[in-house]
Image (spheres, helix red, strand yellow):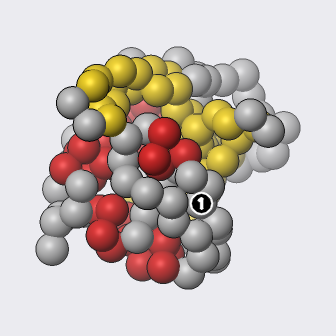
Amino acid sequence: MRVKTACILFALGLGGCAHGPAGDVAQASYDLCPGTSLTAAEANLGKAGYKLAPAPATPGTLETGWNEFETRQGDATGTSSLRVKVQGAEGGVRFSIWAADGAGEVRWDTLTPEQVKDDVARALLNRIRKDVCGAGSSPEFLTAG
């Protein structure tokens, strides 16, 4: 699956703009929670304090509401609103992270390998992955390699 990423990463202080297939490298497998059911993912998100959105129209999916996360741009810290979308997948669930922009929502979590080296972005992605997949998942799935 190829998803284009808008320049929202720069606005969130998480790197520059990433477009096209390069982003697929980092996103390719971290977004899968093997062995996690949709019900378990929903419970995990609830335990982690996420606001859940009303039941989506598409069966086999769930979405959080907009949740605030601390972000950094340069030396300044602030918050950004992100939401998580989860869908059933073979052997588990897959998730994606979305941010608001002027035209609606843009996929936020497709990063180039260089951007995965950014400590703030990597820590936030690892945290959200752990929140979706559960405490048994590796919180350091994405590393600065």
89 above or below 124? below
Q: Residue beneath label 1, please?
A: 5
Label 1 environment density (alpha carbons within 10 Å; few <14, some 14–19, many ≥20): many
From the viewer's perspective, is 87 left or right of 103?
left
Does any portion of residue 41 appear in the rendered image?
no
Does any portion of residue 16 appear in the rendered image?
yes
Query: In percent of the image, x 52 and y 32: which residue is there?
Result: 82
From the viewer's perspective, is 62 left or right of 27?
right
Image quadrant assignment for residue 3: bottom right
113 above or below 128? below
93 above or below 28? above
Q: How many marks?
A: 1
Task: Tell me where residue 90 appears, x and y as whole percent.
Answer: 56, 70
At label 1, the amino acid type is Thr
From the viewer's perspective, is 145 left or right of 107?
left
Residue toward you, 58 or 107: 107
Task: Tell me where residue 55 appears, x and y as whole percent.
Answer: 74, 28
Residue toward you, 29 or 102: 102
Q: State which quarter of the image contains the N terminus.
A: bottom right
Q: State which quarter of the image contains the C terminus.
A: bottom left
56 above or below 85? above
Query: In percent of the image, x 28 and y 23: which residue is there?
Result: 77
Residue toward you, 92 or 3: 3
Disc 1 is placed on an element classified as: loop
Query: In percent of the image, x 48 and y 79: which residue is there?
Result: 22
Task: Tell me where residue 27 appears, x and y as whole percent.
Answer: 44, 68
Task: Tell me where residue 42 appears, x and y as whole percent.
Answer: 50, 34
Query: In percent of the image, x 72 and y 22: which residue is there?
Result: 54
